[in-house]
Image (spheres, rainbow, N blue to C red):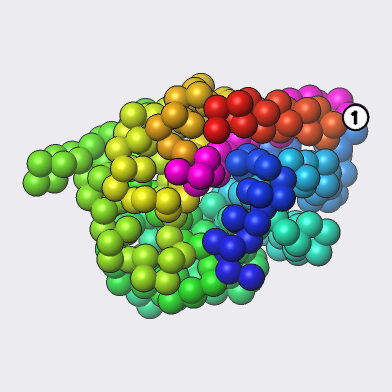
Amino acid sequence: MHFMNSLQAAWQRNHSLVCVGLDPEPAKFPAHLKNRADAVFEFCAAIVDATADVVCTYKPQIAHFAALRAEEALERLVAHIHARHPSIPVILDAKRGDIGSTAQHYVTEAFDRFQADAVTLNPYLGRDSIQPFLDRADKGVILLCRTSNPGGADFQALDCGGEPLYLRVAETVARDWNTHGNCALVTGATWPEELGKVRAVVGDMPLLVPGIGAQGGDVEAVLKHGRSADGTGLMISSSRAILYAGNGEDFAARARDAAIELRDTINRFR
Ligand SMILES: O=C(O)c1cc(=O)[nH]c(=O)n1[C@@H]1O[C@H](COP(=O)(O)O)[C@@H](O)[C@H]1O
């Protein structure tokens, strides 16, 4: 199914705008998992199985797996999500971007090797670096626009003919790159007013919003500035605050509690 259709269906079915980021850090795993050979897969799969009815997407972060030589666990994890929870789309958080010939390999990596439904990309190399992803019309292409980190403004806020660069990115993606309707943007929860400026220029385009939870973004402000006309339009992502809500044998149940609390807080402001 087209990423945008499955995202909209998941928003409705689970009445949730929560995206759970899957960022495994073995040092934070519960003690009973730490010495297990397949701990990365077992940890992430348990979180997924405990939260699949309260989220709209999952977002595994590729470096967290690659640094552990656990790409094969990531392949199995995405296959597990597709098999057990087929209604929940998977975003591979890879933030790729390179010249067209190399970009083609990143397309194969994200969509054929890892079987992701969408991927995060850095638009800095321009249209031709993104075109091979845009051509996969059924896949989501999620472009960095105004990132959540403190240094996000170093370049993204630079004046670009009277407007900040991040708004130029938003306008260009909405006007020129979204011909297949498969684009979305990353706008950090830590900059809610800028998120609102992006919303004003992109209509109902989905926004991936990391930065609540561990980075301190404010849910009410995100909804106020970022929701679309029908009260959706957002994938509000939280990784550490959900994954490591508990570190005992009941870690998955604690993660579920944290995801439900976030879903309900978000829904109060929709
Ligand atoms: O693309 C992302 O997901 C992302 C964009 C951004 O602007 N800020 C940001 O923190 N992220 C990702 O979100 C995750 C951190 O989420 P927390 O643990 O909830 O803070 C990491 O995987 C980051 O790579």
Residue 237 can be seen, yes or no: yes
Amino acid type at mark 1: Glu
Q: Quadrant of the C terminus?
A: top right
Q: Main secondary structure of the magenta part?
A: loop
Q: Quadrant of the N terminus?
A: bottom right
Residue 218 is situated, as x and y percent measured from the top left of the image, at 49, 23
Magenta-span inclusion, residue 242: yes
Residue positioned 32% across, 59% down in the render: 173
On the image, which quarter does residue 142 sit in? Answer: bottom left
Residue 191 is situated, as x and y percent measured from the top left of the image, at 37, 29
**In this view of the protein, which residue sits in the foreground, 61 or 133?**
133
Query: Does residue 162 sit above or below 249 in this rendering?
Result: below
Residue positioned 29% across, 47% down in the render: 201
Question: Count the marks: how many?
Answer: 1
On the image, which quarter does residue 35 sit in? Answer: top right
Residue 223 is situated, as x and y percent measured from the top left of the image, at 48, 31
Residue 241 is situated, as x and y percent measured from the top left of the image, at 65, 28
Query: Does residue 89 sit above or below 23 in this rendering?
Result: below
Magenta-span inclusion, residue 152: no
Query: Does residue 104 sit above or below 39 in this rendering?
Result: below
Q: Which residue is mark 1?
A: 249
Q: Left or right: 118 with respect to 121?
A: right
Residue positioned 37% across, 65% down in the render: 178
Query: Does residue 106 sit above or below 199 in this rendering?
Result: below
Please tell me whether mark 1 sits on a helix, a strand or a loop: loop
- Read off the magenta span: 228-250
**In this view of the protein, which residue sits in the foreground, 174 or 211?**
174
Residue 68 can be seen, yes or no: no
Q: Is mark 1 within 8 Å of ligand 1?
A: no
Residue positioned 35% across, 35% down in the render: 196
